[in-house]
Image (tube, rainbow, N blue to C red):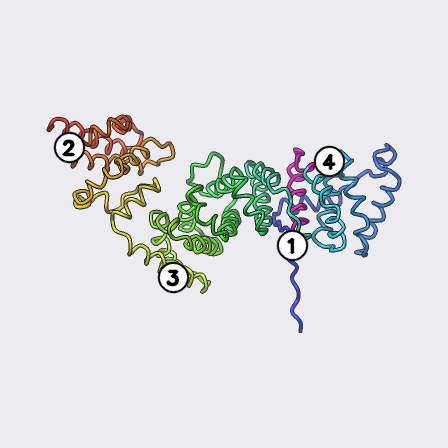
Amino acid sequence: MAAATVQVPLAMVNNQFFDEFTDKVRVKPIPWEGFSRAGLVSGSELQGLQEFQQKAKHSEEGLGAYVGVLVGLLEKLSSLDAQQYLLVKLDDLVENDAEAREQLGREYAAVEKVLFRCMDKKDDYLGLKAAKTLVGLSAGVQRPCAYGRLFGVLERYMKSELTSVVDVAVQIMQSVLGQRQARLALYDECPGCLAQLVDVLRRTQSGGRAPRGVVAVPQTQYEVVFCLWMLTFEARIAQTINRTYDVIPVMVDIARAAVKEKVIRIIVATWINMVKAPEANVPNMLVARVPACLQTLSTGRSLKDEDLKADIGALAETLASHSGAMTTWDEYLTELASGKLHWSPAHRSEQFWKLHIRRMDESDHRVVRRLGEILAAPTSDETALAVACHDLSQYVKLNPDGKKLLARIGAKTQVMALMTSESAEVRYEALMCVQQIMLNAWRN
């Protein structure tokens, strides 16, 4: 027996609220005759619409002949109910009727213009349905759309406080990123939209500091990381996306807490793409403790997917091979460059500081200056601030002229300000650093 063919939607959206609203739109009565009597719809347009409705009701062929009527009415009518209904019908044709899709493709520029006008309206459903329809049409007829404008619309919807709106916008993003031109356009021309997508991922973390509330998990986590996974198939994007958007630490936190195996699978797949650019990403993976995360996933979880287990093992081996080639000083510099300081063994090792204290003054004291930058950065967390104070304390302890440099670059002022931090750990390390500065001055 022949296997059944599964039709994959050109633009897939699976959201209960969105689907239920679509069902309501299908059956909501629209006063078409009233529009005709008011002169808003011509007699030929009304006749064409009624013929289309009858043929669609009985699943007859030849619906493509009526796309001009649907698009024309969508453009001229201001009734929200009518616009929603017409969009639902157009989306049905895009997804299910090749002839109608081809006919829409012949008038692509005009159709795209009408759909963008719908996206500019203040109705969430209308805008999202128009975006989905455009993405499906673009994929179906293999024509690029105005990606920059589309991503601007999706960025706006991803800022919504409504979980369903955010979810649908991300799913539309998933669909459009199947097109290579869209991936490049998003990364090169629409950084705000990509930053918003990463913000959605951060908002799925219950302990995060995102500016808005937590959104649906774990499905949203899977959808957003799926977008990142597709982006990282582009080598240039894989090399730079973490440097710009700091996505590796976020994915580590999510992978550790993930309940759904598919979330872990898509995160590991994204890391595998990123590790193909080792110079750019491996150091950041080591700093973010991806190897430890993989070890936890491998030994602390009862994973069912054998391919996922194999991928975790292969990625762990790759990272281990790179880690083995790094010296302790290399690891310290990598951690420092990331700005994500944590209490790795080097910080507490007196031997480490005695061996490498002179290297902190190389290249115009770049290590010391970087520690000062971390103290001044508003994005530095409490642990990073505490560690930076500790490291500067070690520098001053072993370098008689260290206090002068700290004063010159403003780091001394930053440390003193942190003596009143709300964090007990930061206050303590800042106090120890200031004491070391004063003790050094007394000895001199």
For disc 4, the marked residue is: 80
> Is residue 367 within the magenta segment?
no
* Quadrant where the N terminus is found in the figure: bottom right
- Label 1 element class: loop
Q: Is residue 140 above or below residue 33?
A: below
In the image, taking residue 97 as reference, residue 410 lies left or right, namely: left
Answer whether labels 4 and 3 touch (C-beta < 8 Å): no
Q: Position of residue 283 (x, y in %)?
A: 35, 49
Q: Which residue is mark 3?
A: 313
Report the span colored magenta: 117-139
Q: Is residue 215 above or below residue 291?
A: above
Amino acid type, callout 1: Pro
| Place of residue 152 in the rendered image (x, y in percent of width and height, measured from the top left) | 59, 37
Q: CA distance from mark 2 to mark 4?
A: 74 Å
Mark 1–mark 2 Cα distance, whole angstroms, equals 69 Å
| Residue at the far bottom in the pictured view | 1
Specify the label residue 400 is tagged with.
2
Q: Which of pointers 2 and 4 lies earlier in the amino acid sequence?
A: 4
Distance from disc 4 to disc 3, alpha carbons, whole Å, reads: 54 Å
The mark closer to the camera, 2 or 4, is: 2
Relative to 192, say whether 22 is above or below: below
